[in-house]
Image (spheres, grey):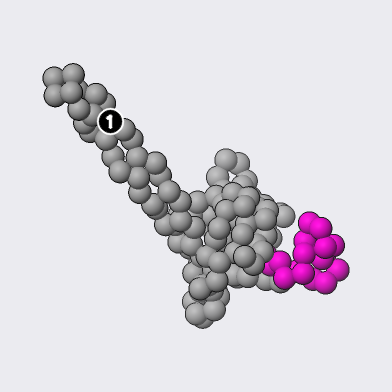
């Protein structure tokens, strides 16, 4: 995808969001807690943290694949492309669960558009759970 195509996709997402047509996209990730350290004076572990979850949210636009793109192996019937701006979002990983509106999908593949070292757009192949 060219940089111009990525800019066009970002504009499409922004227009859809402005018109109330974009979906809310969410990825929730768990972060492990830390055990802290042993205090020999008290004989206890202190200063640890509890596990937590972080939810990343961004607007997104789903677009179906053309029938000619569906090969039944890499792209299956019902798969969709999800365009999500990278700014303020987290890079999705394969097999991760992603919520689009009220539906949950599995990430099949992620195309990252990143001129230089900065991600600007994620094109995510999603499949219904």
State the residue lying farthest toward the top. Answer: 40
Quadrant assignment, res 60: bottom right
Residue 3 in percent (x, y) is at 66, 54
State the residue lying farthest toward the front. Answer: 43
Which one is nearer the viewer's eye here, 62 or 30?
30
Any part of residue 11 in sight: no
Any part of residue 74 in sight: yes
Look at the picture and state if 53 lies above or below 23: above
Residue 108 in percent (x, y) is at 67, 55
Task: Identify the secondary structure beneath mark 1.
Answer: loop
Residue at (49, 58) in percent of width and height? 27
Which one is nearer the viewer's eye here, 87 or 92?
92
Quadrant assignment, res 127: bottom right
Which one is nearer the viewer's eye here, 111 or 45?
45
Q: Which residue has dot 1 on it?
A: 36
Image label count: 1
Whether residue 97 is in magenta: the answer is no
- Our reading of the magenta stretch's main secondary structure is loop
Whether residue 66 is in magenta: the answer is yes
Residue at (72, 55) in percent of width and height? 1
Where does the C terminus fall, quadrant-wise? bottom right
Look at the picture and state if 38 lies above or below 23: above
Residue at (31, 33) in percent of width and height? 35
Residue at (60, 41) in percent of width and height? 116
Residue 79 in percent (x, y) is at 71, 66
Q: Which residues are magenta?
A: 65-83
Q: Is residue 74 left or right of residue 86?
A: right
């Amino acid at each position: 995808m060219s940089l111009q195509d990525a800019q066009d996709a970002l504009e499409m997402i922004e227009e859809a969001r402005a018109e109330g047509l974009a979906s809310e996209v969410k990825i929730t990730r768990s972060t492990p807690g830390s055990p802290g350290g042993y205090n020999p004076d008290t004989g206890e572990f202190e200063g640890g943290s509890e596990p937590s979850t972080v939810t990343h949210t961004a607007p997104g636009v789903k677009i179906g694949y053309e029938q000619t793109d569906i090969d039944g192996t890499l792209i299956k019937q019902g798969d969709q492309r999800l365009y999500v701006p990278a700014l303020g979002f987290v890079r999705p990983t394969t097999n991760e669960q992603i919520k689009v509106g009220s539906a949950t999908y599995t990430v099949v593949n992620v195309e990252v558009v990143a001129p230089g070292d900065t991600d600007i757009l994620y094109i995510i192949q999603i499949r219904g759970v």
